[in-house]
Amino acid sequence: MTRTVAVANQKGGVAKTTTVASLGTALAEQGRKVLVVDLDPQSCLTFSLGLDPELVELSIHDVLLGRVGAAMAIHPTEDGVDLLPATIELSGTEAALLSRPGREYVLRTALEEVSAAYDVVLLDCSPSLGVLTLNALTAADEVLIPLQCEMLSHRGVGQLLDTIHDVQRILNPGLRVLGVLPTMFDGRTNHARAVLADVTSRYGLEIIEPPIPKSIRFAEAPAAGRSMLSTAARARGAEAYRAVATGLFG
């Protein structure tokens, strides 16, 4: 059975894209067939995996508007995952979908054409709770919430959980929250540990282990068009993502 996981947090800069690229690559290293989907108009996942968004001819924008099937827009990457890329055109997709009946189900329907060919589908959500994120939550089986371990970073978690609960009630009753993945983590600080304790007590969410440590290697990897697991394979951050992949997906 294909597992479809939305990686979501309405706050930007919490390593959603890094998490999708790194988990996808870790799973591909294990021999899994993985599709990653870029749902952010900034196209950071697309760029990070070696495609120039300005040169992409067919993207998730075209798929969501029904111009082409998902299979026609998928690209293989050097990291071993397949990519459904995004371009800046995606910024207009939400407006185009607003008047469409069943607009929250468009992504789920589009992925039905290809999902059976994959073990795991990872959805890189935009930092918002708009129509694209609702589509991701409706299409997903599970949600993973990356969280930068700073006090202001978790203020939006409650709003995200409210949205998830609405989706569970109305659109996707089977949706399950995997938990919070600490990112950019510095275990030497009391503050980081206090943030995780607060998230656990306030929201009752599971903390995914191990936390992902801070590393400049994550920032360097996109310039090479590869994930950090390819550019710095033995770095602590790369090993942490491998351990998370094993823990979450077996």
Image (cartoon, rainbow, N blue to C red):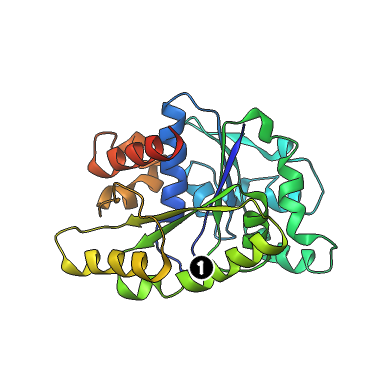
**Taking the image as drawn, is residue 57 in sight?**
yes
**Taking the image as drawn, is residue 225 in sight?**
no
- Residue located farthest toward the top when viewing the structure as drawn: 31
Residue at disc 1, secondary structure: loop
Neighbour tally class for label 1: few under 14, some 14-19, many 20 plus, Cα within 10 Å:
many
- Taking the spot 36% from the left edge, 50% from the top edge, the residue there is 208
Horizontal side of residue 95 vs 181, given as left or right: right
**Where 208 falls versus 171 (above or below)?**
above
Horizontal side of residue 80 vs 211, given as left or right: right
Residue 110 found in image quarter = top right
Q: Nearer the viewer, residue 110 or 233?
A: 110
- Taking the spot 43% from the left edge, 54% from the top edge, the residue there is 179
Quarter of the image with the C terminus is: top left
- Taking the spot 36% from the left edge, 34% from the top edge, the residue there is 230
Which residue in the protein does label 1 denote?
Answer: 10
Q: Position of residue 182 (x, y in %)?
A: 33, 56
Q: Position of residue 104 (x, y in %)?
A: 74, 60
Amino acid type, residue under disc 1 in the picture: Gln
Q: Nearer the viewer, residue 213 or 60?
A: 213
- Taking the spot 24% from the left edge, 39% from the top edge, the residue there is 235
Q: Position of residue 180 (x, y in %)?
A: 40, 57
